[in-house]
Image: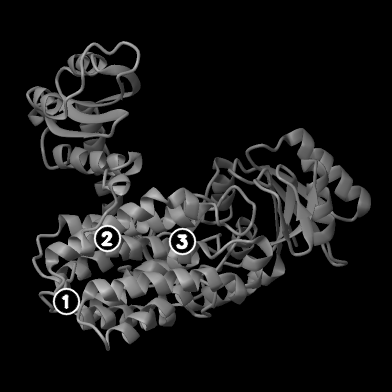
Amino acid sequence: MEVTEITAAKFQDMVRIGAHRLTKNAEFVNSLNVFPVPDGDTGTNMGLSFGSGAKAVNESNANSVGELAQALAKGLLMGARGNSGVITSQLFRGFASSVAGKEALTAQDLTAALMSGVETAYKAVMKPVEGTILTVAREAARAANKQSRETTDAVVILQAVVAAAKNSLAKTPDLLLVLKEVGVVDSGGQGLVFIYEGFLEGLSGEVADDDAYQPDGTEMDEMVNAMHHQSVQSQIATDDITFGYCTEMMVGLGEDGATEKFDYEAFRNHLDGIGDSLLVVNDDEVVKVHVHTEHPGTVLAYGHKYGSMLKIKIDNMRLQHETILEQDQVNAAAAAQEPIDFGIIAIASGKGVSTLLKSLGATTILSGGQTMNPSTQDIVDAIKSANAKQALILPNNGNIILAAQEAAKVADIPVEIVPSKTISQGMTALLSFNPDNSLADNQAQMTAGLADVISGQVTQSIRDTKIDGLAIKKNDYMGIIDGKIKVTAAKRQQAAVDMIKAMLAPDSEIVTILIGEGGTKKEAQAIADAVMAADDELEVELHDGGQPVYPYLVSVE
C-alpha cells in the first residue's frame, strides 16, 4: 500500500498502534535491564511515557498533523518517566517542531521530522552514550534520509526506518561493553523499535490478526480512570451523581458456571441500559467491564451468566466525591498560606526513608524510586505542592534526574537540581543545605557534598549472569557500590558485610544502614557487629527505611 500523504487520521493510527505495541511488550523491554536486579523498568517507563502522549493525541480535537504532533510532544513530556521516557519525549519534541503548521506530511516531511527529533534528543543529553536509544534513533533517521531521495512513499520510508532501527539495535552490544558482557541489546533502543514498528503498521494498515489493537489490562485501567474522572469531579455536587457505584468485573468466558453464550453486541447493549460510562473489551477468553450504576449486584449477576468472575471491584463514587471536595478544601487552604522561602523536594520510597529525609530538612516527599519513577508532571505537581518561592529537587535515583530537569524547565518558580543518585547521597546533600544561602549557592554546595558519601545497595539477583568479572547466580545476593556490582554471595548477611567492608576507607567514620523490605533488625544488627569487629572506631547507625527492592541501603562517610 503506497502512502504519499500522512493525514491527521493516519498519524493518530500510527501513534495509537505505536503505543499499543510498546505497552504490549513492556515486560520484554524490562527484561533487558543490564543488571540482574528486580527493578528493570525501562519498558514500563517508556510505555507510560508514550502512553501519556498517545492519550493527549486521542483527546485532541486537532485536524492537522502539526497540531497532533504538538499534543504528542506535550503529553510525552509531562508523562515522561526515567531517562528512556525523557529521551523519547525529546525525540518527538524535535519531531513536532519540524512539522509545526503542516496539515499533512509527505515522505520528505516525515524524514525531516525524524532527523530533527534526533538532533533535539542529542542536545538534551549532556553526555550522549552510543549503543543506546540515541544510536538507534540516529541510524533509523539516517536510513530514512537516504531512502527519501528515491521515493515519495512514506510506507517505504518507515520500512527503512524499522529495518535500520533493528539493525542498529542488534549492534548496540558492540558499542556498549556492558551490553555485550551481559548478552543483551539496549532496552531503550528496543522500546523505540516497537514504537517504529507500530508507526509502520498504523500507516500501512497491515496489522497481523494476532496483533490487532485491543486494550490490555493497563490500558483498560487508564481508560477507566479517564472515564471516572469525567463523571466524578469537584465541579459538581455529590447529589448530582446519578449512578453512584463504579463497578468493574472481569469474566472468564465459558468457564465453570456459564449458562449463556457470549455475544458482544447483546452483552454490551444489556449493560448500556443500567448505567453510564460503560466500557466493554474482550478477547476469546475474557470480557472486562467498567460501568457506573446504581445496582452493581445486577451487573455482577449478569456477568456471572457468561462464566467465572475473575476480578470484581466496586467503589462508592459519592463517598469518593466527598473525599475529593474535602481534599480541594485542604489544597485551597494550603494555597492561601504564605509560601516558604525554600522547598526541598526529595524523591523516595519507603515510610522510614521518607521520615528520615524529612527529619533532615526535606519539605516535600514525592513517592518514587526504583520500579516507579515519577513522571515530569508528577515532579511539577510536587513543586507546586511545596508552596515555595524557589525549590531544590533531590532525585535520589540516576534514572529520575532527566525528568527532574525537564520539570524544572516548566515550573513556575526557580528550581535547581541536586543530582543525587542514591538515598544516601540525598541524605548527605540535605546536611549541606543553608537557608541563608541563595538557590544557586545551595545547589553548588549540596552537589559538592555528594562526593563525600559512598553508597551501597544489597539486593537479590533475578538471573544468572557475568558482569564486571563477577559470576552471579540467580537468587544470589549482590552488593552494589556506587552503581557497580562489587560483591556477590549466597547469603544476604554475608553480601552486606562484604559490601560494607569494600566501601570502607582509612578515614571512614560513620556507616548508616537503612533496613528495607526483606531485611530484619536482627540481621542488620549482626551486620553492624561484624563491621565494627573489623574496625572498632566506626560508628554504625541503623534505621528502618521500609524501601522496596533493596533489603539494605548503606552509606559510608
Q: Name which residue type carries label 1.
A: Leu
Q: Name which residue type carries label 3.
A: Gly
- Looking at the picture, tell me which residue is in the foreground, 124 or 519: 124
Q: Name which residue type carries label 2.
A: Glu
* Mark 3 Cα shell of 10 Å, populated few (<14), some (14-19), many (≥20): many
Q: Give the image quarter of residue 238.
A: top left
| Among numbered discs 1 and 2, the one appearing first in the sequence | 1
- Looking at the picture, tell me which residue is in the foreground, 423 or 268: 268
- Badge 3 marks a residue whose secondary structure is helix
- Vertical comparison of 299 with 216: above or below: above
Measure the C-alpha gap from mark 2 to mark 3. 27 Å
* Mark 2 Cα shell of 10 Å, populated few (<14), some (14-19), many (≥20): many
Q: Give the image quarter of residue 388.
A: bottom left
For disc 3, the marked residue is: 82
For disc 1, the marked residue is: 105
For disc 2, the marked residue is: 201
